[in-house]
Amino acid sequence: MWRKWSGNLFASGLLALTPMARAADAPPPGPPSPAVVKIGAAYVAKQFCSCLFLTGRSETSCRAEFKPQIDATRVAVDRHALPQRAKVSVTLGPFLAEAIYSRRYGCVLVK
């Protein structure tokens, strides 16, 4: 009885390790697709806008949420029309995303 049980345990252990062995042999992932980069820029623009203008946090505090990915982006904040409106623009690679803050709607992704 013990031999049968231990043999099954050994076989199931090998089966569990097989996907890990295949993953280790897989080539490293390539660069992200342009669609993924565009979505990433839009996400950062909207979330950064909300962090700044809806929660009232500082730029430094908001940047810390996106570390280290935000280092690959260029973030510009236009506050000249505050308290009515403000704009956050994020450039990631060739893509530009913009989110507009307004008192009535909060932060809305516009580009």
Image (spheres, helix red, strand yellow):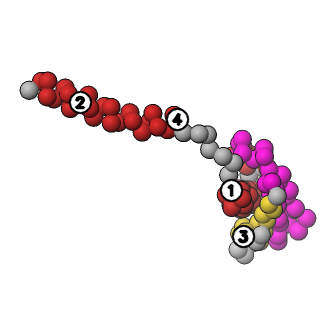
- Alpha-carbon distance for marks 2 and 4? 25 Å
Q: In which quarter of the image is residue 18?
A: top left
Q: Do the residues labelled 3 and 4 touch (CB within 8 Å)?
A: no
Residue 84 part of the magenta-drawn span: yes
Locate the N terminus and report the quarter of the image it occupies: top left
The boundaries of the magenta stretch are 66-93
Q: In which quarter of the image is residue 51?
A: bottom right
Circle 1 or circle 3, nearest the eye: 1
Q: Which residue is drawn at 59% across and 39% down?
A: 27
For disc 1, the marked residue is: 33
- Alpha-carbon distance for marks 3 and 4? 43 Å
Q: Which residue is drawn at 79% across and 54% down?
A: 92
User: SS class of the residue under badge 1?
Assistant: loop
Image mark for residue 108: 3
For disc 2, the marked residue is: 9
Circle 2 or circle 3, nearest the eye: 2
Q: Earlier in the sequence, mark 3 or mark 4?
A: 4
Q: How crowded is mark 1: few (under 14 residues within 10 Å), some or many (20 or more)?
A: few
Is 102 drawn above or below residue 90 in the view shown?
below
Spot occupied by residue 77 in the image (x, y as percentages of width and height)? 85, 58
Q: Residues within 10 Å of mark 4 (few under 14, many from 20)?
A: few
Circle 4 or circle 1, nearest the eye: 4
